[in-house]
C-alpha cells in the first residue's frame, strides 16, 4: 500500500527546468480516433462500408488491429510528463460504447482503469463523441448530450454529433468539460460555416450559464471543430482569445493560435496542415498564483511511428485506410493535450 501511494505521488511530479520548483502535473487530451466502428451492420445508421461485407472489408481482424494501434498511441501520450498519461481524454468518431470498452481493456491501457462516458447521437454516419477518464484524478458528477440543431438548404433539419457535457471533480476542484465534433466542411468552408457556428453557440450558451454563477469556473472545451483557431466559430461565437492577457473573467483562452500561425497542425489535406483538434480553457485556469492547478503548456502528440512514410500521404498522420485499402495506421489526426501544474509547497 505504501509503495503504491508513493508511486502515485511521484506520478504527479514535474520539474520546471528554470526554477527547479517541483510541480504536481496532470494532463487532459483529445483524439479523433478516425472511424472507430464495430464490425456489426447497424440498420439505423450509414455504417455499411465499415462491415466485413462493405467496400473496406472492415472485419474482426482489422478492428482488433486498429484497437491495438490506438492503444499504442494512448499508452505513450503525455507519459513524459506523468507516467499514467492523460487523466481525461475526449474522443471523436466512435460508433458506440462497445468500441471504447474494447479500447480501454487492451493490455496497454487496462491498468489505468479508464471509465467511459458516452451517449449515442443522431449523426447519420453513426459516429459520436465520448470521454475516458482515470478515476484517480476525476469523479463524474453529471453528464448529458447537448443537441445541436441544424437547418438544411430547404429549412429541413439534419443531424450532427451531440456535444458531450460532463461535470465532475478533478483533483479536488469542480471541472466542466465539453467534448465536440462539429459539422464538417462538406460543400465548402464558407457554405458549411453556419453549421459550425450553430454548434459553437450551443457550447457558448452552456458556458455562459456556468460562468454567470462563477466567472472563475474551470472549463475545458475540446474537440475536432472542423475549423481553425482563427475561424469565426471560435473567435467570434465562442469568443476564444489567443493571448492570455486578452481573456476576461468567464472568457476562453485558445493556446493553439500560435501553433496555427506557425503552420503547425494536427491533420493534413492537399499538402496543407490544419489544426481542427483544439482544447480551450476558461479564465479560471490562467492565474498562476492560485492554490489549484493552472495551465502550463499545449502539446501536439506526434511520434515517428505515427507518420505515413510513403505514397500520396507521405508525412501525414498515418491513417487507417488509403481509400478502401487497409494500411494499418492509427488515425488521420494527431492527438493533442494540455499540461496543468500545481506547485509542491
Image (cartoon, rainbow, N blue to C red):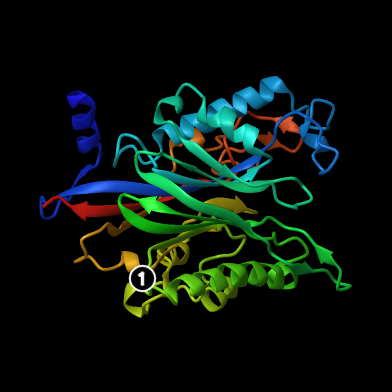
- Inspect this view and state whether residue 278 appears: no
The part of the image, by quadrant, that contains residue 312 is top right
Q: Position of residue 15 (x, y in %)?
A: 17, 46
- The residue to which callout 1 is attached is 283
- Which of the pair 51/114 is nearer the observer? 114
- Which of the pair 172/273 is nearer the observer? 172
- Which of the pair 85/204 is nearer the observer? 204
Instruction: Judge left or right: residue 121 versus residue 286.
Output: right
- Inspect this view and state whether residue 126 appears: yes
Q: Position of residue 83 (x, y in %)?
A: 30, 34
Which type of secondary structure does the marked residue at label 1 adopt?
helix
Report the residue that reaches farthest toward the right.
Answer: 154
Q: Position of residue 226 (x, y in %)?
A: 62, 60
Position of 107 relative to 219 (above/below): above
Q: Residue at x 46, y 48 (%)?
A: 140
Instruction: Judge left or right: residue 15 versus residue 284.
Output: left
Q: Residue at x 78, y 64 (%)?
A: 187
Position of 183 relative to 132 (above/below): below
For label 1, the crowd category at 10 Å Cα-Cα, with few meaning under 14, some 14 to 19 and many 20 or more, is: many
Amino acid at each position: 500500500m505504501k509503495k503504491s501511494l508513493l508511486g502515485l505521488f511521484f506520478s504527479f511530479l514535474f520539474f520546471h527546468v528554470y526554477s527547479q520548483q517541483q510541480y504536481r502535473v496532470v494532463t487532459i487530451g483529445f483524439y479523433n480516433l478516425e472511424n472507430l466502428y464495430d464490425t456489426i451492420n447497424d440498420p439505423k445508421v450509414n455504417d455499411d462500408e465499415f462491415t466485413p461485407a462493405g467496400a473496406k472489408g472492415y472485419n474482426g481482424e482489422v478492428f482488433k488491429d486498429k484497437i491495438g494501434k490506438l492503444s499504442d498511441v494512448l499508452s505513450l501520450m503525455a507519459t513524459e510528463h506523468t507516467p499514467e498519461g492523460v487523466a481525461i481524454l475526449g474522443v471523436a468518431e466512435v460508433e458506440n460504447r462497445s468500441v471504447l470498452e474494447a479500447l480501454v481493456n487492451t493490455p496497454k491501457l487496462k491498468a489505468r482503469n479508464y471509465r467511459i462516458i458516452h451517449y449515442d447521437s443522431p449523426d447519420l454516419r453513426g459516429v459520436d463523441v465520448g470521454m475516458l477518464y482515470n478515476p484517480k484524478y476525476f469523479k463524474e458528477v453529471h453528464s448529458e448530450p447537448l443537441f445541436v440543431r441544424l437547418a438544411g438548404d430547404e429549412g429541413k433539419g439534419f443531424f450532427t454529433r451531440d456535444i458531450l457535457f460532463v461535470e465532475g471533480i478533478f483533483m479536488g476542484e469542480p471541472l466542466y468539460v465539453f467534448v465536440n465534433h462539429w459539422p464538417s466542411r462538406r460543400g465548402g468552408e464558407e457554405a458549411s460555416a453556419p453549421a459550425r457556428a450553430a454548434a459553437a453557440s450551443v457550447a457558448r450558451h452552456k458556458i455562459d450559464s456556468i460562468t454567470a454563477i462563477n466567472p472563475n469556473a474551470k472549463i475545458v472545451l475540446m474537440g475536432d471543430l472542423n475549423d481553425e483557431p482563427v475561424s469565426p466559430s471560435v473567435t467570434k461565437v465562442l469568443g476564444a482569445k489567443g493571448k492570455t492577457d486578452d481573456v476576461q473573467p468567464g472568457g476562453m483562452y485558445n493556446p493553439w493560435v500560435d501553433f496555427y500561425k506557425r503552420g503547425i497542425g494536427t491533420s493534413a489535406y492537399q499538402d496543407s496542415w490544419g489544426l481542427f483538434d483544439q482544447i480551450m480553457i476558461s479564465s479560471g485556469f490562467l492565474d498562476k498564483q492560485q492554490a489549484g492547478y493552472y495551465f502550463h503548456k499545449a502539446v501536439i502528440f506526434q511520434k515517428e511511428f505515427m507518420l505515413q512514410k510513403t505514397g500520396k500521404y507521405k508525412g501525414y498522420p498515418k491513417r487507417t485506410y488509403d481509400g478502401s485499402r487497409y494500411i494499418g495506421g492509427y488515425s488521420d489526426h494527431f492527438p493533442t493535450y494540455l499540461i496543468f501544474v500545481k506547485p509542491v509547497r
